[in-house]
Amino acid sequence: MRKEVGPVLLRDTFAVHYLQAGGDPFTLRERLGQEESVAVKRYLSMSDGKSEQKAKKP
């Protein structure tokens, strides 16, 4: 199944990779132009989940 690439997917991918690379959540919020931290919290949980999945792989 092919997933369409659009602005939302690119923004989400950037945010998750940025946080996984050790980026600061407050800087990410500024870069994305977010006034609320709800989106950044979602990206933090996504990045934590992906880190756990990588750690489980043999």
Image: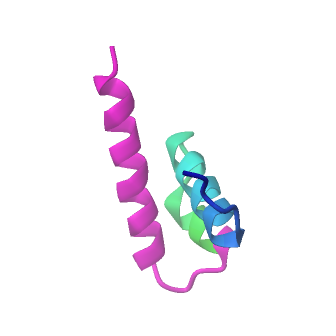
Q: Quadrant of the C terminus?
A: top left
Question: Is 31 placed above or below 10 here?
Answer: below
Q: Residue at x 51, y 61 (%)?
A: 25
Q: Residue at x 58, y 71 (%)?
A: 29
Magenta stretch contains residue 6: no
Q: Residue at x 68, y 61 (%)?
A: 10
Viewer-proximal residue, 15 or 56? 56
Q: In the rendered view, does 23 fall on the left or right side of 47? A: right
Question: Is 51 placed above or below 45 here?
Answer: above
- Looking at the rendering, which quadrant does residue 3 occupy? bottom right
Q: In the rendered view, does 6 fall on the left or right side of 1? A: right
x and y, in percent, of residue 28 in the image: 60, 63
Viewer-proximal residue, 8 or 36? 8
What secondary structure is the magenta-colored segment mainly? helix
- Residues rendered magenta in the picture: 31-58
Question: Is 52 placed above or below 19 here?
Answer: above
x and y, in percent, of residue 46 in the image: 40, 55
x and y, in percent, of residue 20 in the image: 51, 42
The residue lying furthest to the bottom in this view is 35
Q: How many numbered callouts?
A: 0
Q: Residue at x 48, y 84 (%)?
A: 36
Q: In the rendered view, does 1 fall on the left or right side of 7? A: left
| Coloring basis for residues | rainbow
Magenta stretch contains residue 47: yes
x and y, in percent, of residue 55 in the image: 33, 25
Question: Is 5 placed above or below 30 here?
Answer: above
